Image: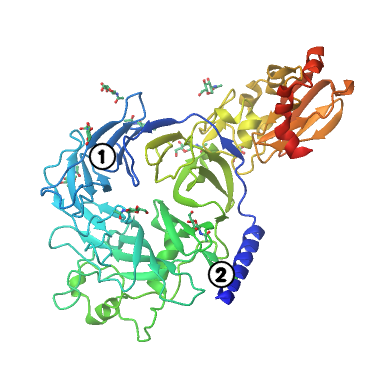
C-alpha cells in the first residue's frame, strides 16, 4: 500500500517537474471584464445541448423538460417551450424529458430526450417549437441517461450515433440509421467505452473514401496498478459500408478499425489518457484537417494535442494489425469499397475481431503536447481567423471547470493565452460551449444562464495602436483611430506583438492621435491622501512590467489584488508631488496613471482616525 503511494508520489513530483520544465503554460496576458450578453434559463439544467438557430445570434438550448430559443440580437426574452413529446405515456414518475441530442437541417430540428427511461426522438418544425407528430422510440440513437455522453452525427439523411442499446448493459458502439436496409451496427464492445466525438472526413475528390471517425475513451485492459484505468482511441468506418454478406457480419461494420490515440511526453512515458473533448478544424483538403483533442491525466492536469487527419489515415492504411501475423489480404481490411457485401472471407475474418492497429496515432508534435496546464479545462472549440494580408491564425477556446474561458493563440506551434474571459458573475460550471465561426460569437452555458461572448470586441485593449497590437489578438486590429475587429487593412502583428508596426505602417497609423499625452492628461488624479495612504494603478497586462516614478526615481510595484500599488509609509514633505505609474511591455513603455499628491491639514487631522487605519490595514497586514 505504502509503496504504491510512494510510487504515485514520485510520479506526481516527476510529473510536476516536467510540467514546470515545459514552459508551455503561460498565464493569460489579460483578464477580460468586458460586457457580455446574458440570457437566463428558467429552471435548473444539469446538462444542456446547444444548437445554432436559423438566424444569426440565436441559439436553441435543450435542457431539463424544456427547449429554449434564445435571441441575442435584440432585447427579446428567451422563448421557452415545455417538452412532453412521446407517443406513449411515460413509465416513470415524475417523467423527465432531458434533451440529449439536437440537430437541424434546413427546415426541421431533430430532437431527442430521455423521456423517463424510454429515449424518444422526433422532428420539429422550427416554427412550431415543442410540437412533434412523429415521435419514435430511440434506443440505440439517444441515451437513457442525461449523464451519458452520446455524440451523434447526420451525414445527409444518415444518422450515426453511439448510444447504448439497453438501459442496463454495455452495448455502446457506433451505429448508422438509414432505412432498414442501410442500418449498420457494431459488435458488442469487450470493454467499457465512452464516446466523445464523431466526425465525417469528407474527401471532395474521392467520395468513395469518405470516413467517419469516432473518438472515445476506453477502460484499459492493462490492470497494472500504475497503468491509467482509461485510454483514448480513434476508430474509423467507411460511409459506403453496408455490412457484410448474409453469412458473415450482416449489418455489421466491415470497415471498422481502431487505434490508440496518444497525448503526452513519450520519453518520460507520461500520458494524458482521458479524452474530454475534441474539435476538428476542417480544411478543403482533408489531409490538412486538424483534430484538437483535450485530455486530462490521472493528476487532473489537462493537455491539448493536435493531430492531422493525414496521420490518422496513415495509421489505418499502413500499420500492422495487432496480434495478426499472416499476410494481409487485398483489399486491405478497412479499405472503403463500393459493395461491402462482396468482401472476401479473409477480410471479414480479420474485421470480426475488431482489429486494432499496432501503431499509435501520435500528435503532429510527437515529443510533447501542444499545451499543458494545471487548469481543469473541460471543453474546446477552435477557430481560424483571417488577419492582415490574408494570413490565417488559429485560436483555441478552452473552458475551465471554474467558469472561465481561455482564448489561446497558436503561434509558431506554441500557446499564447491572449485573454482570460470571465463570462459569469459567479464561479460556475460551464456545461456547454459552442462557437459560431461566421459571426465570431462564442456561447457558453451554466445550469441557468447562457452567455454570448463577442470575440471581435476589442475596445478594452486600450486607445492606442500599441495597446491594440500588443494584445496579439487576431480578431482585433488598429484601424487608425480605434482597436476594432480586424480586417485585411487593420494594423496588427499577431505572431510577435511588435508595437513598432504602428510606426512603420502607413498613413493610417500616423492619423492616430498621440495618445500617450492624451491618456496622461485625462487620468491625472488629485490625491489629497485621505482617507487612504496608497496609490493604485490597474494592471492590464500580466506580461508588462509596472513601476512608479517619483521625483526622478523609480519605485517598484507592490502587487495587491491585481493592482500595482504604491504604499506611502510616512507623510513627509518629500513624499508629496507627482507620481506616475508606467508599464513596459515588449519595448513599449507607456504612462498608465498619474497622481499629484498634496498634504493638507485636513489629512493630518484624519491621520489618527479609525477610518484611515481601516483603509491601511489590509495592506499593512501584507507588507509590514
Ligand atoms: C422580438 O419580439 C417581438 C414580439 O414578440 C417580435 O415581433 C420581434 O420580431 C422579435 N425580434 C426579433 C429580432 O426576434
Ligand atoms: C411549463 O410548465 C410549467 C410548470 O410545469 C408552467 O408553470 C409553465 O407555464 C409552462 N410553460 C409553458 C410555456 O407552457
Ligand atoms: C430534414 O430532415 C427530415 C427528416 O430527416 C427530412 O425528411 C427532410 O427531407 C430534411 N429536409 C431537408 C431540407 O434536408
Ligand atoms: C447524473 O449524475 C448526477 C451527479 O453526477 C446524479 O446526481 C444524477 O442522479 C444522475 N442522473 C441520472 C439520470 O443518472
Ligand atoms: C480532480 O478534480 C476533480 C474535480 O475537479 C476532483 O473531484 C478530484 O478529487 C481531483 N483529483 C485529484 C487526484 O486531484
Ligand atoms: C503584408 O503585405 C505587405 C505588402 O505586401 C508587407 O509590406 C507587409 O509586411 C505584410 N504584413 C504582414 C504582417 O505580413
Ligand atoms: C485576400 O484574399 C481575397 C480573397 O481571396 C482577395 O480578394 C484579396 O486580394 C486578398 N488580399 C491580399 C492582400 O492578398
Ligand atoms: C450573419 O452574420 C454574417 C457575419 O457577420 C453576415 O455575413 C450574414 O449576412 C448574417 N446573416 C444574416 C441572416 O443576418
Ligand atoms: C475605426 O472603427 C470605428 C468603429 O468600428 C469607426 O467608428 C471609425 O470610424 C474607424 N476609423 C477609421 C479611421 O476607419
Q: Tell me what residue is drawn at x 64 percent, y 31 percent.
A: 467
Q: Quadrant of the C terminus?
A: top right
Q: Residue at 25% of width from left, 57% of height from top?
A: 160
Q: In the drawing, does residue 80 fall left or right of residue 559?
A: left
> Residue at left 10%, top 49%?
88
Q: Within 10 angstroms of label 2, few (less than 14), some, or many (20 or more) residues?
A: few
Mark 1 lies on residue: 66
Vertical comparison of 74 with 296: above or below: above
Image x and y of residue 389, in percent: 54, 38
Query: Is label 2 in a helix, a strand or a loop?
Result: helix
**Residue at which label 2 appears:** 266
Is tag 1's residue or tag 2's residue first in the polypeptide sequence? 1
124 displayed left or right of 371: left
Q: Nearer the viewer, residue 303 or 286?
A: 303
Badge 1, how many Cα within 10 Å: few under 14, some, many 20+? many
Which part of the image, by quadrant, shows the N terminus?
bottom right
Q: Position of residue 276 (x, y in %)?
A: 43, 56
Amino acid at each position: 500500500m505504502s509503496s504504491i503511494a510512494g510510487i504515485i508520489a514520485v510520479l506526481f513530483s516527476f510529473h510536476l517537474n516536467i510540467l514546470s520544465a515545459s514552459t508551455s503554460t503561460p498565464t493569460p496576458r489579460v483578464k477580460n471584464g468586458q460586457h457580455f450578453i446574458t440570457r437566463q434559463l428558467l429552471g435548473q439544467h444539469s446538462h444542456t445541448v446547444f444548437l445554432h438557430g436559423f438566424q444569426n445570434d440565436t441559439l436553441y438550448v435543450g435542457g431539463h423538460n424544456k427547449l429554449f430559443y434564445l435571441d441575442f440580437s435584440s432585447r427579446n426574452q428567451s422563448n421557452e417551450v415545455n417538452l412532453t413529446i412521446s407517443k406513449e405515456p411515460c413509465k416513470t414518475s415524475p417523467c423527465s424529458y432531458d434533451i440529449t441530442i439536437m440537430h437541424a437541417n434546413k427546415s426541421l430540428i431533430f430532437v431527442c430526450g430521455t423521456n423517463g427511461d424510454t429515449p424518444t426522438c422526433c422532428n420539429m418544425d422550427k416554427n412550431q417549437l415543442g410540437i412533434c407528430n412523429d415521435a419514435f422510440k430511440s434506443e440505440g440513437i439517444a441515451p437513457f441517461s442525461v449523464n451519458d455522453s452520446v455524440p451523434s452525427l447526420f451525414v445527409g439523411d444518415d444518422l450515426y450515433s453511439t448510444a447504448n442499446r439497453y438501459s442496463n448493459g454495455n452495448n455502446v458502439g457506433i451505429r448508422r440509421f438509414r432505412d432498414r436496409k442501410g442500418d449498420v451496427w457494431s459488435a458488442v464492445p469487450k470493454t467499457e467505452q465512452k464516446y466523445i466525438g464523431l466526425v465525417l472526413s469528407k474527401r471532395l475528390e474521392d467520395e468513395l473514401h469518405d470516413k467517419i471517425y469516432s473518438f472515445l475513451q476506453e477502460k484499459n485492459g492493462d490492470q497494472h496498478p500504475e497503468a491509467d484505468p482509461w485510454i483514448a482511441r480513434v476508430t474509423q468506418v467507411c460511409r459506403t459500408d453496408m455490412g457484410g454478406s448474409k453469412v458473415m457480419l450482416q449489418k455489421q461494420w466491415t470497415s471498422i478499425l481502431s487505434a490508440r490515440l496518444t497525448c503526452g511526453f513519450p520519453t518520460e512515458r507520461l500520458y494524458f489518457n482521458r479524452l474530454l473533448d475534441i474539435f476538428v478544424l476542417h480544411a478543403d483538403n482533408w489531409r490538412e484537417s486538424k483534430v484538437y483533442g483535450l485530455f486530462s491525466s490521472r493528476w487532473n492536469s489537462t493537455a491539448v494535442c493536435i493531430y492531422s487527419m493525414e496521420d490518422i489515415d496513415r495509421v489505418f492504411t499502413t500499420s500492422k494489425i495487432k496480434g495478426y501475423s499472416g499476410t494481409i489480404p487485398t483489399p486491405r481490411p478497412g479499405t472503403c469499397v463500393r459493395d461491402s457485401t462482396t468482401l472476401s472471407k479473409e477480410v471479414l475474418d480479420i474485421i470480426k475481431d475488431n482489429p486494432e492497429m499496432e501503431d499509435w496515432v501520435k500528435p503532429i508534435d510527437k515529443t510533447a503536447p501542444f499545451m499543458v496546464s494545471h487548469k481543469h479545462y473541460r471543453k474546446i472549440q477552435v477557430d481560424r481567423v483571417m488577419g492582415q494580408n490574408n494570413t490565417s491564425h488559429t485560436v483555441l477556446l478552452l473552458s475551465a471547470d471554474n467558469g472561465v474561458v481561455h482564448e489561446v493563440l497558436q503561434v509558431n506551434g506554441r500557446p499564447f493565452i491572449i485573454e482570460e474571459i470571465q463570462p459569469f458573475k459567479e464561479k460556475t460550471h460551464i456545461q456547454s460551449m459552442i462557437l459560431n465561426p461566421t459571426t465570431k460569437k462564442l456561447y457558453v452555458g451554466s445550469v441557468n444562464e447562457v452567455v454570448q461572448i463577442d470575440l471581435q470586441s476589442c475596445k478594452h485593449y486600450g486607445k492606442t495602436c500599441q495597446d491594440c497590437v500588443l494584445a496579439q489578438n487576431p480578431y482585433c486590429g488598429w484601424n487608425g483611430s480605434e482597436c476594432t475587429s480586424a480586417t485585411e487593412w487593420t494594423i496588427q502583428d499577431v505572431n510577435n506583438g511588435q508595437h513598432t508596426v504602428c510606426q512603420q505602417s502607413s498613413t493610417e497609423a500616423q492619423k492616430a492621435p498621440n495618445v500617450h499625452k492624451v491618456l496622461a492628461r485625462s487620468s491625472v488624479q488629485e490625491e489629497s491622501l485621505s482617507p487612504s495612504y496608497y496609490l493604485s494603478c490597474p494592471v492590464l497586462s500580466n506580461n508588462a512590467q509596472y513601476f512608479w516614478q517619483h521625483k526622478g526615481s523609480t519605485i517598484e510595484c507592490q502587487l495587491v489584488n491585481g493592482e500595482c500599488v504604491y504604499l506611502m509609509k510616512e507623510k513627509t514633505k518629500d513624499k508629496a508631488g507627482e507620481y506616475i505609474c508606467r508599464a513596459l511591455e515588449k519595448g513599449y513603455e507607456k504612462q498608465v496613471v498619474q497622481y499629484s499628491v498634496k498634504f493638507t491639514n485636513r489629512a493630518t487631522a484624519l491621520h489618527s482616525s479609525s477610518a484611515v487605519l481601516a483603509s491601511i490595514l489590509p495592506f499593512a497586514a501584507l507588507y509590514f
